[in-house]
Amino acid sequence: MKQIVFATNNKNKLREMREIMEGLYEVLSLDDIGCHEDIVEDAETIEGNAKIKADFVTNKYHVDCFSDDSGLEVEALGGAPGVYSARYAGEHCTYQDNVDKMLAAMKGQTNRKAAFRTCIALNLDGQSYFFEGRCDGRITEEQRGTDGFGYDPIFQPDGYEQTFAELGHEVKNAISHRGKATRKLIAFLKELG
Ligand code: IMP
């Protein structure tokens, strides 16, 4: 079976990707290839950070690799927090800190449009590819729901009355930024066979 490295140690992302790729590729984690370096993600774009991780692994370990990076872009905040979504409220902040900071920043704001974006960078057989997924929606006035993670309790996707945290995994995966980007990657890899 062909092998491909997913530049992550996030157990949820790995499990999901292994299930999807079963029979097509054996998906290895950073742990699996003995990569324990701290990869510094200091690009100013989501695309840039995805590429930093994939290139680091391919260049150092000489393997095919993909990596993903995501962020929330809020129109009224000029696209922030974007690439800084994980550490919006500070270097060691919690998801709740980020939610609180976002609600405070958006207090009284009438333009509540926002979008989640995921970029997947793939290095395969010496070539580089990108796959993007986007989910448009709005920042709610209050947090709702307990499912999911990150900004899920305050993100209401277009066409729905509930937040990601109220919709549950199945619906979220079907419409989310990460779901869309991942399906593009899978379709590409399946086509190659
Ligand atoms: P990552 O690149 O997938 O690790 O995402 C970076 C940050 O963006 C996360 O730490 C979250 O704060 C936020 N984020 C990304 N995807 C989601 C999502 O699906 N729901 C909520 N927050 C997300």
Image: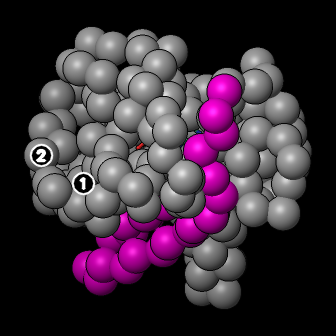
Query: Residue at point 23% right, 20% down?
Result: 90
Q: In which quarter of the image is residue 119?
A: bottom left
Q: Give the quarter of the image for residue 62.
A: bottom left
Amino acid under disc 2 = Asp
Q: Is the magenta stretch mostly helix, strand or loop?
A: strand
Label 2 close to label 1 by CB (< 8 Å): yes
Q: How far apart are marks 2 and 1 (CA)?
A: 7 Å
Q: Residue at x 12, y 46 (%)?
A: 42
Task: Judge from the rendering whether residue 62 lies leftward or rightward of residue 89; answer left or right.
Answer: left
Q: Give the range drawn in magenta.
A: 116-142
Q: Earlier in the sequence, mark 2 or mark 1?
A: 2
**Mark 1 sits on what residue?**
49
Which quarter of the image is occupied by the N terminus?
A: bottom right
Instruction: Look at the picture and state if 133 lies above or below 69.
Output: below
Under mark 1, the amino acid is Asn
Q: Which numbered dot is residue 42? A: 2
Percent from the top left, x then y, of residue 153? 67, 29
- The secondary element bearing badge 2 is classed as loop
Nearest the viewer among 13 and 163 is 163
